[in-house]
Image: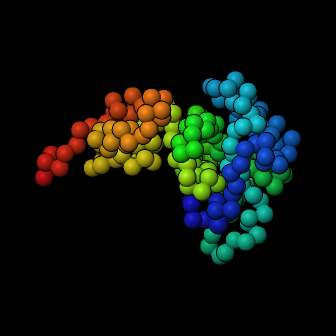
Amino acid sequence: MENQWIVKDAIVCKIKNSGLSFELLQEFIEDVIYKHPNNSILLKELSNIYVLVALKGSEVYLREGEKSWKDILTEHQYEKLKKHNKFILAYMLVEEIDDHYHFIEILDTIVPANNFARIMIQKYEYLNDYKVKLIPREIIDTSVYYWAKYLTFISKGEIDKDEVLRFINDLPDTIKDQIKWNCLIDKSSDISDDEFD
């Protein structure tokens, strides 16, 4: 999905800098934010939420065989894209801890199963000239395997505890002290090459 032209052309920006129409934002708040379990946090930080935005105009430049937004979005979502010329694919709330590490506080996709969370993270890091590493502050039980895969902790089909601990130990103390990755550590395994001869 990352290699599709329309996805490459999607933009990441803070809502306050997005130029999204009032009507589109109102729909986003009603359809997505109000229904989120952390809606009070998201409403309070609304203008600082980063969004991954599909652009209807990107479809003009499609080459033969490339997917269009119509192929990716539901019919209802595509109607919204046509109506506003933009559509929010994913969103995240970030805390900028220092010049090198930013924490993902909340990350979710509106269009599932298309790697839009990963794409959003990559585009965010690109916006910061890859000088910033974006990592989750907390890894909850339901997202353990997503983050283990994203952070390349999977070895021989399991979460490699040594890799997890090595990554954590390499973090600055100020970052290490703030992350809550117990669920990830608890679900990781001690993996050695001897066990897989």
Number of numbered discs visible in the structure rendering: 0
Residue toward you, 20 or 132: 132
Question: Looking at the image, which residue is at 61% across and 65% down?
Answer: 4
Q: Examine the rendered structure and indicate whether residue 151 appears above or below residue 161.
A: below
Residue 63 can be seen in this image: yes
Residue 104 placement: quadrant: top right
Q: Position of residue 14 (x, y in %)?
A: 72, 44
173 horizontally vs 102: left or right: left
Indicate the quadrant containing the N terminus: top left, top right, bottom left or bottom right.
bottom right
Q: Position of residue 49 (x, y in %)?
A: 70, 38
Question: Looking at the image, which residue is at 17% across and 50% down?
Answer: 193
Q: Examine the rendered structure and indicate whether residue 151 appears above or below residue 6.
A: above
Residue 22 placement: quadrant: top right
Question: Looking at the image, which residue is at 69% across and 45% down?
Answer: 51
Question: Looking at the image, which residue is at 78% across and 46% down?
Answer: 17
The extreme top residue here reads 40
Q: Position of residue 84 (x, y in %)?
A: 83, 51
163 horizontally vs 117: left or right: left
The extreme right residue here reads 22
